[in-house]
Image: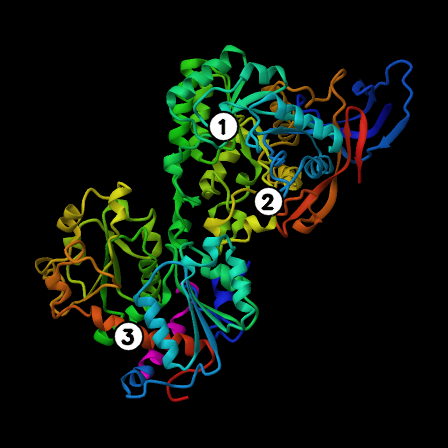
Amino acid sequence: MPDNLDLQLDDNGRLRHFLSIEGLNQAILTEILDTAESFTSVVDRTIKKVPILRGITVANLFFESSTRTRSTFELAEQRLSADILSLNVSTSATVKGESLLDTLQNLEAMQIDMFVIRHQDSGSAHFFAQHVRPGVSVLNAGDGQHEHPTQAMLDMYTIRHYKKDFSGLRVAIVGDILHSRVARSQIHALNLLNTAEIRVVAPRTLLPVATESLGVSVYEDLELGLKDVDVVIMLRLQKERMRGALLPSEKEYFRKYGLSQERLKLARPDAIVMHPGPANRGVEIESSVMDGNQSVILQQVSFGISVRMAVMAMIVGQSGASS
Amino acid sequence: MSLHIKNGLVVAPAESAQRAADLYLQDGKIVGIDQAPAGFEAAHTIDAGGHWVMPGLVDCQARLRDPGQPEKANIESETLAAIRNGITTLCLPPDTQPPIDNSATVELIHHRNEMFGHKAHLYPIGALTRGLGGEQLSNMASLRDNGCIAFSNAKAPLANNLVQRRAMDYAAGQQSLVIIQPLDQDLLGNGCAHEGAVATRLGLPSIPEAAETAALAKDIELVAQTGARTHFGQLSCARSVDMIRRAKAKGLPISADCAIHQLFLTDHDIACFDSNMFTIPPLRSQSDRDALREGLADGTIDCLCSDHQPHEVDAKLKPFPSAEPGISGLDTLLPLALRLVEEGVLPLADLVAKLTLNPARILGLPGGNIEPGAAADLIIVDPEIHWICHAADFVSKGKNTAFEGWDFDGAVTHTIVAGTIVYQR
């Protein structure tokens, strides 16, 4: 079975699929960020289109619901002039018993060139990539609790935009690390970009075992974890975590792990606050922080479009807006 | 039918070393070792020069998927795989469809084996509770009288500790063996990989060690309480080995096995979501693997089994967490086991005991030994045959191997059941 690296990169080290940050290298990540930067000008034009994906059909397959990721993918595809097929698969074929592989093969019969897939199983994007025809590409829009690589890249874009260089940065990722594909991708990306210190902050029930093996330092105390950081990334707390006996209550979680103005003062004065969304105000983050002047949460969403454009352009062998 | 096996190296599990000896078989039994009994005339002679002669393997845990899941396997396909790979006796867990909780299913299995089977002995393990539902005791006495050699709830949970205690009491009262695969269903949850760095990195729902050890601790306490003779199957954790060792030292009537794949694979073999590596209990860490090997060598673990779980292609052709667990193991049981000798884990005669005499004794089955009067279930193994494992070559209907591309030394040249050659290479 091919490993990540073999699967994602072709013989010349170019992106063939985009499945996980793990298995990529610093050069590719930097190229994605640079390419995305060249696309920001397109996004700001009156006519927001370039012909890079003209004649290419992209299928957006969301087996799990999504608002932000799906719409920014669709916008990115439109701005690259792709033909788009968006399927809400959670309400269609697989519910009727069709296997994932059959769904894939039926769509391939419609001459799809690129799949953007979100699925509840960890490893589903790799599974797709292992079974598509040669020449067809797979982009992971979130697989189970494994990775969400385009989200991580837009987060890296945001950090680079505000902080320029990763090598002196302290970054804290706060919240449900255990169930978070975003956190896993972010951690790999931050490590590949030589971030000085990556901290994860969570109660023990929301930390996977051997978290340190990912290359992070673990804090169970938010106030210690926030001390002198340059970037705070808050993760969404899903309500069902209370039911699984992982946490006592939202109220206690906010008391111990909620990001308030007061706590934010422990970070560096120029620290930025990020959140992959959708945020629960008053659960993991105070409204005043979310709307405050250190928050870059909305900028993350807009950067998401150019980052996704960049990844798709690189997969079809184009390296920027000018070409 | 009389058979003379000459010039072989006999590996008798009760003896410390193999020795050159001729064997004489008649009427389904071993009638002479070294010396032919008076008047013996061989109808057929096998020259086993340079080859090992050992008892046919007794696999204490193999699913043949019959009745109920013909898309995965059946008695015909799997008994052929067994005899081709030196396994002459198979013990069948009760989670067939329908489960082995009534005498008709037992009879059906024996009938199908007579009609379609390839002469391997099949021994059904009866369900501990009706329909494996975990609530009501099965008709254990009738099932035993109809040939169930032991009772187990397989991987299905029991409703509560009271049901378990009473089931063990009832089984003990009729001198039946209870077989338990310790697994706490709540701690198992929707887990599919060992709780460790690999599952953390791949974001796979994880199965903590305690899913096995917490259950095992409770099970051992219930053995102490009820005195029920109990066999623990398919252990996977270092701590379980330790618990079994201590319980045995206290004199509790217990025994244990582990699946052969647990002695070779770890969670690292999941690599990039290889669904053939999805097993329950999961492939665990290197230190668990090492402890299982140690437990095997020091006698804490009595038997090795294939934990054979054949699947149709589609069952594994899914993202890892959605695939079905289990490995098709009949084709690789013996070659993997022989590797343990090569790797210095234990001597050949001890290894053979783990695959023959020990399970036969624990389960109360004939065979498993080479001595005058014993059943003539024998295999001849050429240790020099070198081969590469390919799923496509599997005799089992299940091609779901975790050992694709592995190099093996040693293959079966003859399988003899009840004195008759049923397979010849």
- Quadrant of residue A131 in the image? bottom right
Q: Residues within 10 Å of mark 1 (few under 14, many from 20)?
A: many
The answer to whether residue A246 shows anywhere in this view is: no
Q: Position of residue A266 (x, y in %)?
A: 11, 60
Q: CA distance from mark 2 to mark 1?
A: 21 Å
SS class, disc 1: helix
Position of B56 relative to A283 (above/below): above
Q: Amino acid at mark 1?
A: Leu
B72 and A12: which is toward the camera: B72
Q: Is residue A139 magenta?
A: no
Position of B86 relative to B194 (above/below): above
Disc 3 designates what residue? A303
Q: CA distance from mark 1 to mark 3?
A: 55 Å
- Report the magenta stretch's main SS: helix
| Disc number placed over residue B132 in the picture, else none | 1
Give the residue drawn at x 19%, y 70%: A296
